Image: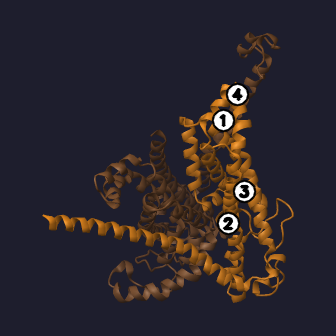
């Protein structure tokens, strides 16, 4: 009934098949072309933005690279902007220590949790774990900072530091030199919780790229689930796990406010996880106010941001390339 | 022989049970961390929370423990985050659409996704520093406008990727059906993809908003801080994360208490947004074709 009899059709069939000859179709094609070009320009934006941010920071921090050799900036010990001394070494080491402690604390738990969620957990457990991780990821850094200040700093001060003082004092990285609770360990604990949701969700994705056939084959010959995971699944996902860890580390490197609130902010070369430190992001955030009052100070702080950006870009690009590659494998299979 | 077999059997099963146990312990640990954070924030924030906190702006002597509230910061944060989200949306929707309809899994599509992921990873302090260089170049002072611009940059990759992930799950058949009927790719994007994208857009908006309202490091550089409610885009504005941060730095216990209360307010907003997006996207997902 609804079919139109060709004979009564208002247009001959030839005209319909002849694409682009009819004015309406041509204008639609033009519209499509135009839209494609406009959309294309929009997608240039993210690619260009990375370049623009880098170039803008490089441009503003150029004076300091001109005034001092890079070696003096990166490895200089002394930070006295008033005397024209800009040594980033304490800050770079501070960033490194805080990040390392955070990653070391986070990674084992993250691997276990993601294996559990990917391999063992019931759908119900997963559907509870997902919102929990989402909420953890949604909590703002400053709230993590408040939590660190109220819970972690006293915990480190009253519990961990005395324990370490009693049992591990002879090991230099656990020595308690400044018993305040503010320091690398507190910042590391806070960071570990902050980066956990990201690492877990990336690892979970990676685990789910392993085809089920492999699991079934291993289980069918009598392996336990853990044997399957250890001998079959983990070797498959090795690069992805490392990439997830690197991604988490790059997130920890740039964390500012939460770390700033619990790390103590003393520019020194740390030797123990109970020492205070002064990471690069904290340096930038604490001193932006005086930035324009001392010559080269603004260039120095923006070059700190540039150093941070460079490291994070490298970490991010490498890990994302690995992760995207592994995830594509899933789409392909 | 039988003894050996039995021993091996026990050992690997013991291992299985042990690994499973420590995995469950780690999961409880992670969930416990969330519980602990919320518990501490509520317990310490609630006593200092009052009606004045959310309805008044700071009065004289507020930072020495006298009367007033942080309405300036609450409103400032809402302005900043809404402005940033709106601006980011204008760019993220076309990008997500283009990624779906025109690029798919092509090489350029991969580059764009990679660069969005990389942008996502750039810390907000670097965006703040970048915003600062922009402000010097353009000659704007710390203002609502500068804050909105920087937050839009921060939210753009998050929102685009969130939409992209949702729209990726759209069945190819839908697209093929539309194309087979003779529609152009643009028409597919406009009439098919947009409708399927709706839950994705909602999730993305709330995700971006949540990130924007909680971000402190970038706003520190670009939006400044003031006790007044902003009346124009060119004025500086207060924000909740900075209100928390500055009040905690005060030597007065009463002011610190209010800092905890401000943290509670911020947490409640962020959690409401996060749970709301979950609920809303589940609801809207009913109206898409899967």
Residue neighbourhood size for the residue with mark 3, other residues' Cα within 10 Å, grouped as few (<14), some (14–19), many (≥20): some
Question: Which one is closest to the eye, mark 3 or mark 4?
Answer: 4
Q: Is residue A68 among the parts visible in the rendering?
A: no
The first of marks 3 and 2 along the sequence is 3
The chain letter corresponding to brown is A
For label 1, the residue is A40
Mark 3 touching mark 1, by CB under 8 A? no
Nearer-the-camera pick, B236 or A110: A110
For residue A327, say whether it is visible. yes
Earlier in the chain: of badge 2 and badge 4, it is 4
Chain of the residue displaying label 3: B
Whole-number angstrom distance, CA of label 2 to CA of label 4? 41 Å
Question: Tell me, what hue is chain B?
Answer: orange
SS category of the residue bearing label 2: helix
Task: Tell me how far mark 3 sits from mark 2, CA to CA.
Answer: 22 Å
Q: Which residue is mark 3?
A: B135
Height in image: A21 above or below B27?
Answer: above
Image quarter (top left, top right, bottom left or bottom right) of the C terminus of chain A: top left
Can you tell which mark lies on residue B184? Answer: 4
Q: Residues within 10 Å of mark 4 (few under 14, many from 20)?
A: some
């Amino acid at each position: 009934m609804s079919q139109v009899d060709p004979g009564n059709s208002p247009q001959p069939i030839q005209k319909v098949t002849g694409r682009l000859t009819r004015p309406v179709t041509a204008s639609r094609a033009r519209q499509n072309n135009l839209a494609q070009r406009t959309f294309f320009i929009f997608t240039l934006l993210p690619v260009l933005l990375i370049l623009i941010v880098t170039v803008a920071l490089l441009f503003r921090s150029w004076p300091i690279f001109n005034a001092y050799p890079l070696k003096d900036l990166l490895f200089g010990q002394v930070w006295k902007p008033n005397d024209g001394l800009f040594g980033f070494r304490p800050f770079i080491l501070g960033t490194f220590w805080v990040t390392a402690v955070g990653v070391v604390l986070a990674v084992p738990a993250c691997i276990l949790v993601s294996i559990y969620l990917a391999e063992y957990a019931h759908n119900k457990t997963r559907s509870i774990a997902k919102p929990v991780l989402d909420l953890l990821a949604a909590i703002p850094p400053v709230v993590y900072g408040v939590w660190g200040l109220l819970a972690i700093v006293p915990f480190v001060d009253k519990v961990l530091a005395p324990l370490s003082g009693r049992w591990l004092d002879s090991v230099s990285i656990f020595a308690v030199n400044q018993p305040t609770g503010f320091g690398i360990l507190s910042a590391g604990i806070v960071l570990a919780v902050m980066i956990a949701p990201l690492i877990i969700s990336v690892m979970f994705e990676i685990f789910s790229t392993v085809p089920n056939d492999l699991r079934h084959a291993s289980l069918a010959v009598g392996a336990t689930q853990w044997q399957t995971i250890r001998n079959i699944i983990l070797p498959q996902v090795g690069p992805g796990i490392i990439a997830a860890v690197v991604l988490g580390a790059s997130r920890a490197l740039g964390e500012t406010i939460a770390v700033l609130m619990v790390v103590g902010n003393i520019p020194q070369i740390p030797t123990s996880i109970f020492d205070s430190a002064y990471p690069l992001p904290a340096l930038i955030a604490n001193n932006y106010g005086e930035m324009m009052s001392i010559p080269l100070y603004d260039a120095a702080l923006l070059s700190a941001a540039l150093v941070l950006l460079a490291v994070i870009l490298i970490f991010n690009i490498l890990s994302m390339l690995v992760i995207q590659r592994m995830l594509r494998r899933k789409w392909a299979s | 022989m039988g003894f050996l077999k039995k021993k091996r059997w026990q050992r690997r099963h013991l291992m299985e049970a042990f690994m499973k146990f420590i995995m469950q312990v780690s999961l409880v640990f992670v969930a416990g961390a969330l519980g602990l954070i919320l518990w501490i924030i509520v317990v310490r924030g609630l006593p200092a929370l009052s009606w004045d906190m959310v309805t008044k702006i700071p009065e004289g002597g507020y930072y020495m423990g006298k009367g007033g509230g942080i309405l300036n910061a609450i409103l400032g944060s809402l302005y900043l985050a809404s402005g940033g989200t709106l601006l980011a949306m204008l760019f993220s929707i076309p990008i997500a659409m283009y990624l779906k309809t025109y690029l798919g899994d092509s090489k350029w599509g991969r580059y764009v996704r990679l660069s969005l992921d990389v942008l996502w990873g750039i810390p907000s302090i670097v965006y703040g520093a970048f915003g600062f260089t922009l402000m010097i170049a353009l000659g704007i002072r710390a203002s609502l406008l500068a804050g909105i611009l920087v937050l839009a940059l921060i939210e753009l990759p998050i929102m685009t990727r969130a939409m992209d992930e949702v729209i990726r799950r759209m069945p190819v058949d839908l697209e093929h059906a539309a194309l087979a009927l003779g529609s152009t790719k643009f028409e597919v994007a406009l009439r098919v993809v947009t409708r399927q994208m709706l839950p994705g857009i909602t999730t993305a908006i709330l995700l971006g908003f949540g990130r924007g309202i909680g971000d402190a490091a970038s706003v520190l550089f670009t939006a400044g801080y003031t006790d007044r409610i902003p009346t124009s885009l060119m004025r500086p504005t207060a924000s909740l994360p900075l209100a928390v941060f500055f009040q905690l730095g005060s030597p007065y216990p009463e002011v610190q208490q209010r800092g905890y209360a401000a943290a509670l307010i911020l947490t409640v907003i962020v959690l409401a947004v996060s749970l709301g997006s979950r609920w809303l996207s589940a609801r809207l997902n009913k109206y898409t074709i899967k």
